[in-house]
Every structure is written in C-alpha cells, then in structure tokens.
Amino acid sequence: MKRQHILLFLTPLLLISCHNAESARNQVRDKADHIIINGTVSYIQLEGGFYAINSTDGKKYDPRNLPQSFQKDGLKVRLQAKTLENAAGFHMYGTIIHIIEITEAAQ
C-alpha cells in the first residue's frame, strides 16, 4: 500500500518535470524560428474584412495578433514573428503568424 502511495505521488512530479524540460527546449527553438518581415499592412475585404501584411519580397501573411494601433491600410512595418505551422484560419490569405515585435518602418 505504501508503494502505491509513493507511485501516486511521484508520477505527477515526473510528468511535470518532463513537460518543463520540453517547454524549455521549445523556447530555445522558438527563437531560432522567428522571421523578420518588412512589408505593408493591407486591409483585405474578404470574410468580413481583416488586416494582412504583404512583405516586400511578395509573401503574404495573416497575423493573429496585429495591434490595433497598426491596423492602418498602407502602413509600412517591420516585424519579428513566428509562423504558426499547424494553425488553421478562415481568411485563406498567406501564412498565419504570431507577431513578437512590430514597429512602423520609414515611409
């Protein structure tokens, strides 16, 4: 009976420590996965309308978290983002991204 109590106590600790180790590895890997984008914010009139980013190299991005202060059609921006590979969206417009940092670029 004592052995079962010890196992019941140790099992969650073991699972938590494994999860924390995986999270730490993901945080390091995530920084390497960041991309830098220079582009223009565009208002796209599809699906009720949304803001996207068209990069200077012709790629299209669908940001999940574009701050309201940057939601201006034609605004030139520079941003650091992470692509959300497994994310699904209904805009069907470019790569879905999560913005890490964004600044207004020189016009």
Image (cartoon, rainbow, N blue to C red):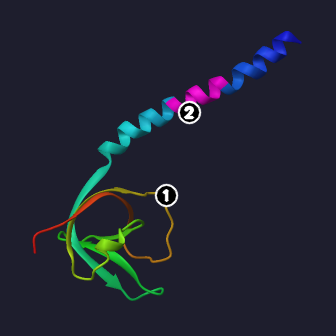
| Secondary structure mostly taken by the magenta-highlighted segment of the chain | helix
Tell me the crowding category of disc 1: few under 14, some 14 to 19, or many 20 or more residues within 10 angstroms, Cα based: few
Q: What residue did someone put label 1 on?
A: 86
Query: Magenta segment range?
Result: 13-20
Residue at x 32% of width, y 43% of height = 31
Q: Secondary structure at mark 2?
A: helix
The quarter of the displayed image where residue 93 is located: bottom left
Q: Is residue 24 left or right of residue 5?
A: left
The quarter of the displayed image where residue 83 is located: bottom left
Residue at x 50% of width, y 76% of height = 90
Q: Going from the N terminus, do you reach mark 1 or mark 2 first?
A: 2
Circle 1 or circle 2, nearest the eye:
2
Q: Whole-Å distance between the Cαs marked 1 and 2? A: 20 Å
- As drawn, the residue found furthest toward the right would be 1
Residue 16 magenta: yes
On residue 55, the disc is none
Task: Name the amino acid type tagged 1.
Answer: Asn
Question: Residue 65's x, y, as percent?
Answer: 40, 65
Question: Residue 16's x, y, as percent?
Answer: 61, 29
Residue at x 42% of width, y 58% of height = 84
Residue at x 21% of width, y 68% of height = 77
Question: Residue 22's x, y, as percent?
Answer: 50, 33
Task: Say if 11 sits above or below 66 in the image.
Answer: above
- As drawn, the residue found furthest toward the front would be 69
Tell me the crowding category of disc 2: few under 14, some 14 to 19, or many 20 or more residues within 10 angstroms, Cα based: few
Q: What residue did someone put label 2 on?
A: 19
If the image is split into quadrants, where does the C terminus sit? bottom left
Question: Residue 48's x, y, as percent?
Answer: 47, 87
